[in-house]
Amino acid sequence: MIDLALISYIVVMSITPGPNNLMLATSGVNFGLRRTMPHLIGISLGCGVLCLCITLSFSMILNNMSSIRLPLAMLGCTYLLWLSWKIWLAGSPEGKTHAHPMSLVGAMLFQWVNPKAWLMLVNAAILFSSRETNVTVSALLLSAAFIVISFPCIYVWALMGDKLRETLQIDWRLRLFNGVMAGSLALTAFWLLWDEWRTFQALA
């Protein structure tokens, strides 16, 4: 079941830019790699748990997908916009005082309202669930694959942020970086919401 096609799918979907990776790069710059580790682990575990739940509840999710996708996307994109505002504030001296990296549990829970995570994991459940093995075994294997394979892919983003940290110690550079990342995250939220709205209109 865990073949080259599945590995390639997880690598491509995990390493490409998205809400998780933008937040990891920003966290790496502002807090360093060590303090970003709970966020990293939370994303991998959160995707794994969500994948397990989706695969085990596959028929129910397919039947209700049109009704739950848009509300989840709206909730997730609202949260992304709030996060982009917090990232923007992190560039100011007063913002640094109150800033802190996302917790492991917070990162896990975020996957439930992350539109990219839902798209990635529902597609994986459709494409890679084995019809030849027990559904529980298949779900556990798929979930484990996401946890193990996605971690080094998203680690790259946090590491990249950590390596840029010294370069961005100058206040205006850090403010500029956080501004760009905040803007990118906000644009990502609007794009995801627009894409989900078009999908909802097509299914309506």
Image (tube, helix red, strand yellow):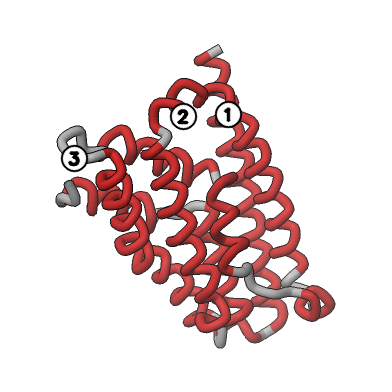
Q: Name the residue type under label 3.
A: Thr
Check whether the beta carbons of the residues at disc 1 and disc 3 lie within 8 A of each other: no
Q: Residue 148, image x and y in percent?
A: 32, 64
The residue mark sitting in front, 1 or 2, is 2
Q: Residue 37, image x and y in percent?
A: 50, 76
Q: Dot 3: few (<14), some (14–19), or many (≥20) neighbours within 10 Å? A: few
Residues under labels 3 and 2: Cα distance?
Answer: 20 Å
Q: Dot 1: few (<14), some (14–19), or many (≥20) neighbours within 10 Å? A: few
Residues under labels 1 and 3: Cα distance?
Answer: 28 Å
Give the mark, 3 or 2, whose residue is nearer the N terminus: 2
Q: Mark 1 points at which residue?
A: 68
Q: Name the residue under label 2.
A: 61
Asked if residue 75 is positioned above or below residue 150 in the image, the reply reads above
Tag 1's secondary structure?
helix
Q: Residue at x 67, y 69 (%)?
A: 176
The residue mark sitting in front, 3 or 2, is 3
> Residue 138 occupies which quadrant of the picture?
top left
Residue placed most toward the observer, 27 or 128 = 128
Q: Name the residue type under label 2.
A: Ile
Q: Residue 99, image x and y in percent?
A: 74, 74
Q: Dot 2: few (<14), some (14–19), or many (≥20) neighbours within 10 Å? A: some
Give the mark, 1 or 3, whose residue is nearer the N terminus: 1
Determine the residue located farthest toward the right in the rendered image.
94
Q: Name the residue type under label 1.
A: Ile
Tag 3's secondary structure?
loop
Q: Residue 125, image x and y in percent?
A: 33, 38
Q: Mark 3 points at which residue?
A: 133
Q: Which residue is drawn at 20% across and 33% down?
A: 131
